[in-house]
Amino acid sequence: MSIVRRCRGRCTTPRRCLEHLWFDVMYRGSRYRIAANDFAVPRMDPGKQRPIQSMEEARHWERLFIGEIQAGRDPQRPRTPRKATDVTPKSVAAFLDVYVERCVKPAGLRSVRSVHSRVAALKQYLGELALDALEEPDEINRFKTESDYAEEVEISTVHRALETLRAAMNWGMAQTPPLFRKSPFNRFGVRMNKKLETMRDRRLSRDEEKRLLDTALQKMNTGEHRLMGPLLHDRIIGAIELCCRRGEMLLIQNKRVNWETWQIGIPGAATKDKENRRVPFNPEGRLAAILRRRSALGPDAFVFGSDTGAYQPNIQTAWETLKLLAYGYEPKPAREGAAWNREQLRRIDLRWHDLRHEGACRLLADGVDIRIVQLMLGHASIQQTQRYLNVTDEELRRGLEVSWNNKGRPLRLASGG
């Protein structure tokens, strides 16, 4: 214990005295002594300075006293606290801009674009509020339940935006001086119930896959569609066979294909978790034929790039056109029929990421161990993989047939007779 009492003269309560508390610590051969109030009061917030009022509070300042010594600072010389300046953000919009510039960008996150999108939604509905309005849950709960944004998107998307806001407020509370006194994200304030999030269970049937591939080779292999069909044909096969994310797949180069081990190396710079990954492929399968054909473009060519091997970062427009054509809708010009096109795409309800889901589900249905599927997907935990996989009714029925066709020891019914 480094807290001692040094009551001198007539002290009426020597056993409970808080006025004459001292901190007395030996550290690396040196002795540090100072009156507790002399250490604590200068370090209190301006306007809230007062003597120590309890032993619990004294122990709190004792820990800070020892921390100052261990950090190599003189505890008798308090650091000058930083004062709020005119550049301190006054509104929510200004605060979020500061958070992005000083925290998100320096962190080098791969999801910076997603953070920008969520911050834009938060600024649209909360940006004009004063900063301290975020300390109470009312405005945030109204954004969560009553805003146009909450009506347009899934509840999971709203939760991701709120998670970004929570991270920003935690960062704000860690600043000097703190930008917030408390967080509204607690059991009695803003809550994010993950059970309300709808798990996506869209599967791509074999017939749908054939329809997409046939449409790519036939209807989209024309000058009107810039001959994008064959390229999309290869990319769809690659997404299903490799179970890659779209960004990872588009960055695969021929030099990453190892024909001796039948593996494709995906560098960590291209992955979401920045972990290097090697994905095997069937040397006799349909993906191998694509890899052999594209290898003629040279080692630096991108397997799923343009017809010359150049990198193509964006294929969303061609993908949407293919879906409309495959499901019997003739795309309308962007200016005249953009809303109509979006409505038909909403009915089709097929996303590129569903191809990755489908590839993993097919591996599981073929008897591949779920731990192998986890490595294919690049997931950090088996629980994440389990949430990812969707089992069809037919696969469930085939799995239960093992029990139905039990040919082992027959079960006997227990009777009371």
Image: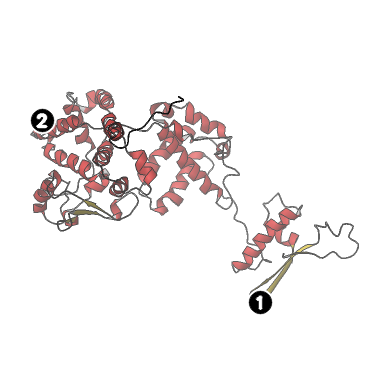
Residue in view at x 88 percent, y 60 percent: 11
Number of the label disc, if any, that sits on residue 219 = 2
Mark 1 or mark 2, earlier in chain: 1
Number of the label disc, if any, that sits on residue 29 = 1
Q: How far across and how far down the image is residue 338, in percent?
A: 25, 26
Residue in view at x 33 percent, y 33 percent: 410
Residue found farthest to the front: 417
Q: Quadrant of the N terminus?
A: bottom right
Q: Which type of secondary structure does the marked residue at label 2 adopt?
A: loop
Q: Quadrant of residue 215?
A: top left
Residue found farthest to the right: 10
Asked if disc 1 and disc 2 are in contact, CB closer than 8 Å, the reply is no
Q: Quadrant of the C terminus?
A: top left
Task: Kindly tell me whether residue 42 is visible in this rendering.
Answer: no
Q: Which type of secondary structure does the marked residue at label 1 adopt?
A: loop
Judged left or right of residue 373, residue 148 is right
Residue found farthest to the bottom: 29
243 vs 217, nearest the viewer: 243
408 vs 125, nearest the viewer: 408
Residue in view at x 48 percent, y 45 percent: 167
Judged left or right of residue 401, residue 259 is left
Q: How far across and how far down the image is residue 143, in percent?
A: 48, 30
Q: How far across and how far down the image is residue 111, in percent?
A: 36, 46
Question: What distance separates the C-alpha of mark 1 from that of mark 2?
Answer: 84 Å
* Residue count near mark 1 (Cα–Cα under 10 Å), binned few <14, some 14–19, many ≥20: few
Q: Is residue 402 above or below residue 253?
A: above
Q: Amino acid at mark 2?
A: Lys
Q: Amino acid at mark 1?
A: Gly
Judged left or right of residue 147, residue 271 is left
Q: Is residue 92 above or below residue 198?
A: below
Q: Quadrant of residue 351?
A: top left
* Residue count near mark 2 (Cα–Cα under 10 Å), binned few <14, some 14–19, many ≥20: some
